[in-house]
Amino acid sequence: MRPTRTWPLLLTALVIAVVSGVGLRSWAAGGHELPALPWTAPGVMALMAIAVLVAGLPVRRWTRGARTRPLDPLMAARTVVLAKAAQYAGSLLTGWYAGQALALASTLDVASRRAMAVRALVALLTSVAVWVAGALVERFCRVDRTIDDEGPDRSPA
């Protein structure tokens, strides 16, 4: 499995930020209210980042040498998939919340819009945290070929 590349994810986040920022600004200019952004959104994303990191810890311990018992290959594969999903979701959500912050930037003099912009920025930071957690856990799952080829009973050839 290949590592997730950062540049396409950055480009995706940038494109989504611009498109959603322009779209939300035109939506608001048409007399519509912007989508609500509750505090639970960044809270859930913070929990997601923590869950991804916790899921990656057993794999990290195993790759660092704590091999008292064998690592379940299915659990390791699921951990890599979770890490990749966290990176993609973090990238998409980063773009979305950056777009919301951009759409609110011109109306920061209104107290309710300023509060919504603060929530958007906090959500932006937590979505970046999900992205970074996914990248870290994907690194945790990298195994050298020598470790993979060595069994618990075999020595390196």
Image: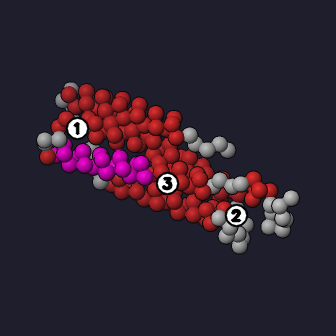
Distance in Å between CA atoms under marks 1 and 2: 49 Å
Distance in Å between CA atoms under marks 1 and 3: 28 Å
Residue farthest bottom in this picture: 68
Q: Which mark is residue 71?
A: 2
Does any portion of residue 82 appear in the rendered image?
Answer: no
- Residue under pointer 1: 105
Question: Does label 1 or label 2 sit earlier along the sequence?
Answer: 2
Task: Specify the segment rendered in magenta.
Answer: 112-129
Does any portion of residue 52 appear in the rendered image?
Answer: yes
Secondary structure under badge 3? helix
Question: Does label 3 or label 2 sit earlier along the sequence?
Answer: 2
The N terminus, quarter of image: top right
Report crowding for label 3: few under 14, some 14 to 19, many 20 or more residues within 10 A (C-alpha).
many
Q: Amino acid at mark 1?
A: Ala
Question: Does label 1 or label 3 sit earlier along the sequence?
Answer: 1
> What percent of the width, then of the height, locates residue 119?
27, 49
| Main SS category, magenta section | helix
Query: Which is more toward the observer, 151 or 83?
Result: 151
The quadrant holding residue 102 is top left
Distance in Å between CA atoms under marks 3 and 2: 21 Å
Q: Residue at image x 18%, y 29%? A: 31
Q: Is residue 2 magenta?
A: no
Left or right of 123, for residue 10: right
Query: Which is more toward the observer, 64 or 32?
Result: 64
- Residue under pointer 3: 133
Q: Amino acid at mark 3?
A: Ala
Q: Are marks 1 and 3 in contact (CB under 8 Å)?
A: no
Q: Residue at image x 31%, y 51%? A: 122
